[in-house]
Image (cartoon, helix red, strand yellow):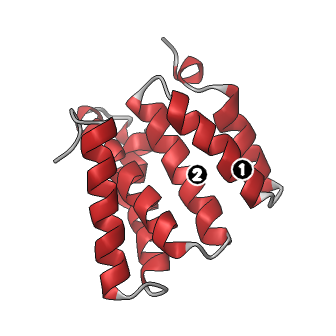
Amino acid sequence: MSACSLFTGNLKEGISLIEKKDYEKAITVLDSEIDSARTPQAAAKAYKYRGIAKAELKDYRHAYTDFQIAWKLSCTLAPKYLADDKASTNEEYNDCNSVIPEKLHEIKHFLSDFSAIMATQKAAEIMSKKYPAFAR
């Protein structure tokens, strides 16, 4: 199965809406993608992009939760690429090691420590319910 076949039109539409700065509609579309994601890779990308849209709307706590979930999924998927010479071109690898940590850092200063802890706990709760094989 190719990487392109892993993603539905909802993910592509959500990304397109973010590019058009229609963040509220992007969130609705990405909600649908998250609910129907066929793979952890698709879910990770949908959470990442929904986090971006929520951050643009200054919904930092929920964006932080989405980024935490995307990070956990991406980092669980990334190790298989570590020995690969093409690791630096793999999206899960890059999301785990730079992209999502940078997003978390960018929005962290908009949250109190308590809010960040609560967002992280919510992410852990969602991970254990929706993705028990990936929860740590």
Q: Write the residue at 42% across / 70% down.
A: 104
Q: Determine contact: label 2, label 1, CB under 8 Å.
A: yes
- Give x and y (percent) for residue 95: 42, 51
Numbered label tally:
2
When the figure is inspected, residue 45 is found, relative to residue 105, above or below; the finding is above
Numbered circle sitting on residue 49: 2
**Foreground of the two, 20 or 125:** 125
- Give x and y (percent) for residue 46: 54, 43
- Give x and y (percent) for residue 88: 40, 45
Q: Residues within 10 Å of mark 2 (few under 14, many from 20)?
A: many
Tag 1 residue:
26
**Foreground of the two, 93 or 107:** 107
Q: Looking at the picture, which amino acid does disc 1 mark? A: Ala
Q: Nearer the viewer, mark 2 or mark 1?
A: 1
Q: Looking at the picture, which amino acid does disc 2 mark? A: Tyr
Q: Write the residue at 36% across / 39% down.
A: 87
Decide if residue 9 is on the left or right side of residue 55: right
Q: Residues within 10 Å of mark 1 (few under 14, many from 20)?
A: many
Q: Write the residue at 68% across / 33% down.
A: 10
Quarter of the image for residue 39 reads top left
Earlier in the chain: of badge 2 and badge 1, it is 1
